[in-house]
Amino acid sequence: MLTMSVIGCFGYNAFVVSKSKSDSVTGTLGTSYEAEASSNTNNGTKTFSCNLCSGGVRVGWISFTIFLQFNNINIDHSGNYTLKIYYINSIPNRVTSAFVSVNGGPKVMVPGLQILTVNCCDNIPPQVTQMTISLQAGNNTIKIFSPTDYAPDIDRIAI
């Protein structure tokens, strides 16, 4: 597993983003799942290079009927977990939205998406937002979509 930390500044906020490259699903807390992994389901998303993304790639064009679904999110015990979404809002000054659905359940809006105020993308580290989701023991799916607009580009998620 390759691990990297990036220190950056976005707007007036300084932050540290820790990154790890792994397509594996181990079922342990802190496991990262790359957006570009071949095990994911998508129906029209595009990949773009991203120097500061964990796998060097981000997945975009998530919009309307186009989605990104992370498959085989294996959890040992049912319960509430923190979902971290690493993303880049690739269009400057655009307010965007995204929703998450776990195991085909109801959509929940992703909180705290930042507005990009500079040109995108190679020198901008991904932003991170988090939310609580309920996962079942065994395999789960996490679908990211936006029925009304373009969602931000996704680098990875972590549980």
Image (cartoon, grey):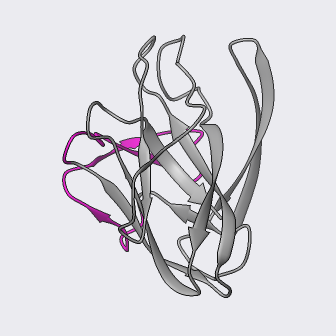
Residue 72 position within the rendered picture, expressed as x and y whole percent measured from the top left:
46, 79
Residue 55 showing in the rendered view: no
Which quadrant of the figure has residue 106?
bottom left
- Regarding residue 16, the answer to whether it shows in the image is yes
Position of the C terminus by quadrant: bottom right
Residue at the image point whose x is 42% and y is 45% from the top: 99
Which residue sits furthest front? Answer: 106
- Residue at x-position 19% and y-position 47%: 65
Location of residue 34 with respect to 150 vertically, above or below: below
Majority secondary structure of the magenta segment? loop
Q: Is residue 127 left or right of residue 144?
A: right
Task: Please give left or right for residue 36 compared with residue 24 in the image.
Answer: left
Q: Is 64 positioned to the left or the right of 32 in the image?
A: left
Seen in the picture, residue 38 relative to 9 is either above or below; the reply is below
* Start-end of magenta stretch: 37-65
Asked if the magenta segment contains residue 40, the reply would be: yes
Q: Which sits in the foreground, 6 or 65? A: 65
Res 31 → quadrant: bottom right
Give left or right: position of 5 versus 126: right
Q: Residue at x 22, y 48 (%)?
A: 66
- Compared with 36, 78 (above or below) is below
Q: Is residue 30 magenta?
A: no
Q: Quadrant of the N terminus?
A: bottom right
Give whichever of 66, 78 is nearer the camera. Answer: 78
Q: Is residue 98 above or below residue 149?
A: below
